[in-house]
Amino acid sequence: MSSADLPHVVIVGGGFAGLWATRALARERVRITLIDRRNHHLFQPLLYQVATAGLSAPDIAAPLRHILRRQRNVEIRLGEVVGIDADAQAVTLGDDGQVGYDYLLLASGATHAYFGHDAWAAHAPGLKSLDDALGIRRRLLIAFERAEAADDPDERAAWLNFAIVGGGPTGVELAGTLAEIARHTLKDEFRRIDPAEARVRLVEAGPRVLASFPPELSGDARRKLEKLGVEVVTGQPVEAIDDAGYVLAGERVRARTVLWAAGVAASPLGALLGAPRDRAGRVRVEADLSVPGRPDVFVAGDLASVEQDGRPVPGVAPAAKQMGAHVARAIRARLAGRTPPAFRYRDMGNLATIGRMAAVVDLHGFKLKGMLAWWFWLWVHVLFLIGFRNRLLVLINWAWAYWSYQRHARIIFGRPDSDDPGP
């Protein structure tokens, strides 16, 4: 049988779910086409480190072609899927090309959700891609430069006023790291301002930060943030955001830098399937992660709505990896004429870092906090990075940052006199 006659598996998305599914099919007699609009796999849990100048983009990303260079049954195609014809078993790309399939996996991830206030996106960027991270890094560094140049005290204060909306792991990590940058990294580098006077505020609409953690660890995280100088506001949703600031509890706050970490919505590709979706746009899938009525179409990762024991499976990296590997098993079972097994998520626990030598870890009731939790968090993240080079570089950069408080990636791209916040 020639390779052209082998069953064709099309995988959309080179994130955790898509990459793990691709690798799990390495020994199968199938041909795989992996489609992604970016040429790299991104380790999203450390994306905030790029946004806050602790790591460079290549430290947490690797080209898909390099990762899969030895897997001979894979063809990688750079492109964006804009249409799906499930009856004809074909996906349409943005360049009007079409790719047919025998089995399809949609693993295109999630995007930012502004809860009906999409206009806020222009003033409060979120963090989902390297482009987002580089744009946020530029915003943060430019803010201190603008404050240094400002003659008006009120304008200077607005540039030194930072707000992060959303008290989940990303918001907590951003807030804690930004406070450390202001108080330690930039110390003695400016002449007209004291960066330590920067106001970093974390705003969470719910009653506590890190709501998915036990209350004990959530409270510890809040205390650590406040010790770093972060002002933590809970129980109050942001009411408005524009280019000059935000409104909270009816009060107008001048702030030139607002970052969004409050919510995610599923990739719009899910809507192309015509399948039932939840309120966040995630596709409701069968027990084996296939689309109802479409046994040849699977959905995994942040795009899949999966419940287990009456609770939703969280949109975290371990869940996406497990879903991707399961889809590979399901395809293998269908090729052999067997009924695919049901997906079962193995919860590995929750981790979040707050700052230097401070983190919280919840491993099914076994709780860690402080320095020990930080070391555990560090080694887990290094272990799961793609490639030896990335692990080595991240360890070196973190060791340097630990001893010196310095962040080597503080380069501002673009014209310094431009208001464009992009990279």
Image (spheres, helix red, strand yellow):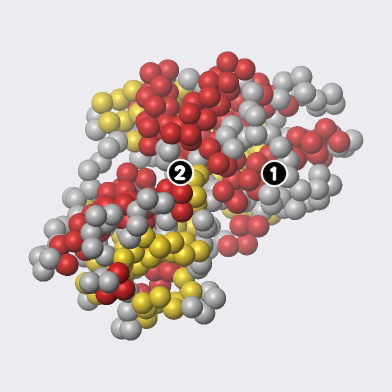
Q: Position of residue 202 (x, y in %)?
A: 56, 37
Q: Amino acid at mark 2?
A: Phe
Q: Position of residue 186 (x, y in %)?
A: 71, 25
- Residue 236 in sight in this render: no
Total numbered labels placed on residues in the image: 2
Secondary structure of residue under mark 1: helix
Give the answer, above or below, for where 270 lies relative to 405.
Answer: below
Picture coordinates of residue 20, whole percent (x, y): 32, 51
Q: Which quarter of the rendering shows the N terminus?
A: bottom left
Identify the disc placed on residue 43. Answer: 2
In the picture, measured across the screen, residue 316 lies left or right of residue 399, that is left
Of the two numbered discs 2 and 1 in the rendering, the one whose residue sits closer to the viewer: 2
Choose between 249 and 268: the one closer to the eye. 268
- Residue displayed at 55% across by 45% down: 165
* Secondary element at tag 2: loop
The residue located at (50%, 68%) in the rendering is: 80
What residue is at 68 percent from the left and 39 percent from the top? 140
Q: Residues within 10 Å of mark 2 (few under 14, many from 20)?
A: many
Hey, what amino acid is under mark 1? Arg
In the picture provided, is 182 more to the left or to the right than 191?
left
Is 195 or 255 nearer to us in this picture?
195
Q: Is residue 156 visible?
A: yes
Say few, some or many: other residues with alpha carbon within 10 Å of mark 1 (under 14 / 14 to 19 / 20 or more): many
Residue at 86% across, 36% down: 149
- Tag 1 residue: 139
Q: Quadrant of residue 326?
A: bottom left
C-beta proximity under 8 Å, tags 2 and 1: no
